[in-house]
Image (tube, rainbow, N blue to C red):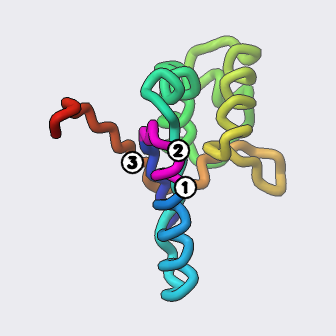
């Protein structure tokens, strides 16, 4: 089961350090450790994952592999608007196409980690 964890990591150096540590652990164990997508701020995350795009992911995950027009019909939206959302999500690896050209979400689980803490914490 593929899992994607989405994180807000404003400290780029810390994010790179964490990614390096995870790579080494995965290399040493040979076990799947999940996949990660990091954003520098909540604003950056929400520029990509708008409510409409989140609906695309939810609907496509439930429907399984389907074509763009079928996805647009399921969403009750215009196919050209859905196409723009699909392109944005495909560019970040959240949607893929199978051998037949059908769209699908390659992750069985998408988990978001968002912390809001005071500076003193």
Name which of mark 1 and mark 3 comes first in the sequence.
1
Q: Is residue 76 above or below residue 69?
A: above
Label for residue 35?
none
Spatial CA span between label 1 and label 2: 6 Å
The secondary structure type at the circle numbered 3 is strand
* Residue 13 place in picture, x, y as percent: 52, 50
Residue hosting label 3: 111
* Residue 52 place in picture, x, y as percent: 53, 19
**Who is closer to the viewer here, 96 or 63?**
96
Q: Is residue 25 above or below residue 7?
A: below
The answer to which quarter of the image holds residue 9 is top left
The secondary structure type at the circle numbered 1 is helix
- Which span of residues is magenta-colored? 8-16
* Residue 32 place in picture, x, y as percent: 51, 75
Asked if the magenta segment contains residue 113, the reply would be no
Residue hosting label 2: 12
Residue 63 falls left or right of residue 115: right
Query: Which residue is rendered at x = 50% and y = 34% of the image?
Result: 40
Q: Tell me, yes or no, whether the two marked residues, 1 and 3, touch with CB atoms within 8 Å.
A: no
Residue hosting label 1: 16
Name which of mark 3 and mark 2 comes first in the sequence.
2
Query: Which residue is rendered at x = 73% and y = 26% of the image?
Result: 69
Residue 11 falls left or right of residue 118: right
Spatial CA span between label 1 and label 3: 20 Å
Select label 1 or label 3 by which is in front: 1
Query: Which residue is rendered at x = 55% and y = 21% of the image?
Result: 47
Badge 3: few (under 14), some or many (20 or more) residues near its Cα, within 10 Å? few
The secondary structure type at the circle numbered 2 is helix
Q: Tell me, yes or no, whether the two marked residues, 1 and 2, touch with CB atoms within 8 Å.
A: yes
Select label 3 or label 2 by which is in front: 2
Spatial CA span between label 3 and label 2: 20 Å
């Amino acid at each position: 089961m593929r899992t994607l964890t989405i994180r807000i990591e404003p400290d780029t150096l810390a994010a790179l350090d964490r990614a390096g540590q995870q790579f080494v652990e995965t290399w040493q164990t040979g076990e799947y450790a999940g996949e990660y997508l990091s954003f520098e701020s909540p604003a950056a995350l929400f520029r990509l994952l708008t409510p409409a795009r989140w609906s695309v992911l939810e609907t496509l995950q439930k429907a399984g592999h389907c074509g763009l027009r079928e996805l647009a019909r399921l969403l009750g939206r215009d196919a050209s608007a859905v196409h723009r959302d699909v392109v944005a999500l495909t560019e970040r690896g959240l949607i893929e196409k199978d051998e037949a050209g059908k769209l699908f979400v390659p992750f069985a689980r998408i988990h978001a980690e968002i912390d809001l803490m005071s500076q003193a914490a």
